[in-house]
Image (cartoon, rainbow, N blue to C red):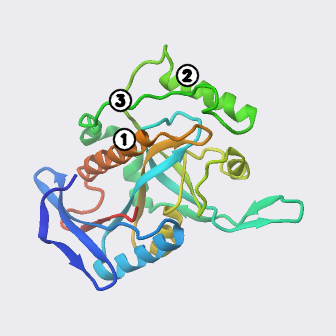
Amino acid sequence: MFPDKAGTGVYNSGSREYTLRIADAGLGERYTVAVLRQIEQGNGEAQEAARDLLQDLAPKLVLVVGIAGGLPSDVTLGDVVVGTRIHDLTIEARDAQDRVSYAATGGPIDRGLAASVANLDGRDELRNWSASLPARPAVTWAEGQLYGPTEWQDKLRRRLEQHHGATATARAPSYLAGPIASSDRLVKDPAVLFPWITTARNLLAVEMESGGVYRALRERCPMLPIRGISDLVGLQRSEAWIGFACASAAAFLAAFLCTRPVPVGDSVAVGPS
């Protein structure tokens, strides 16, 4: 998404290596972007990566870009979720009766950044953000491809019919802003979500990095998750949607930077996933 190098194109701090690029900020202006990938999955590695990034480059904004799992909702495969609140559900307690509870941490994104996100629908820069994406892969939900409790499968099936059924109106990928859940668990079992959605009923996506980034950067640097939906919890995962969701998140990222979320001339870090 960012072919133009900044300087030599690479910066090695001794602990991390960053790819340095120039990003279009609209109106003929540009950002310097440092792209960082995590070495391993999870919020612990994300927290360390974000701390290193803050020390090495002192960015004005960190964007956590990657894929996430979606819940049956208005969001479907290939869409993008912009996280406005991070529910960090890493700390889990399980009693002798196998009952689960969580010490939820995290919180809302920076207030100024949240105001910008709230007005994204009014920004012309995002009007055609998905135009360059390839054709969507096929979506199927035949017998055996759905799993989880019957009620969850029924809800997921209704949403799949709504978005991808024979009578559904075809549309380009869209974006929606809202809360996301972050933990060190790759969630495939819908039952894992039940304690989460009891207290965070409007969750849009689940992932494994933003909680750690939020911990590292809280009150030090604004951060914003941008996650392409690669799978739906309860639907057998398709590898084709992973690549599409990556492309979708990257395309949205490029368009989002054209809205100038921080003053031009500042550095923006993209990572860690």
- Look at label 3 and name its amino acid: Ala
- Residue that label 2 marks: 161
Cα distance in 3D space between marks 2 and 3: 16 Å
| Mark 1 or 2, closer to the camera | 1
Is there CB contact under 8 Å for labels 1 and 2? no
- Look at label 2 and name its amino acid: Glu
The crowding category of the residue bearing disc 3, from other C-alpha atoms within 10 Å (few below 14, some 14 to 19, many at least 20), is few
User: Which is nearer the N-term, disc 3 or disc 1?
Assistant: 3
Give the SS element for disc 1: helix
Give the SS element for disc 3: loop
- Where residue 88 sits, quadrant-wise, is bottom right
- Where residue 173 sits, quadrant-wise, is top left
Give the SS element for disc 2: helix
Is there CB contact under 8 Å for labels 2 and 3? no
User: Which is nearer the N-term, disc 2 or disc 3?
Assistant: 2
- Residue that label 3 marks: 172
Cα distance in 3D space between marks 1 and 2: 20 Å
Residue 170: % across, % down: 40, 21
What residue do we see at 26% from left, 35% from top?
128
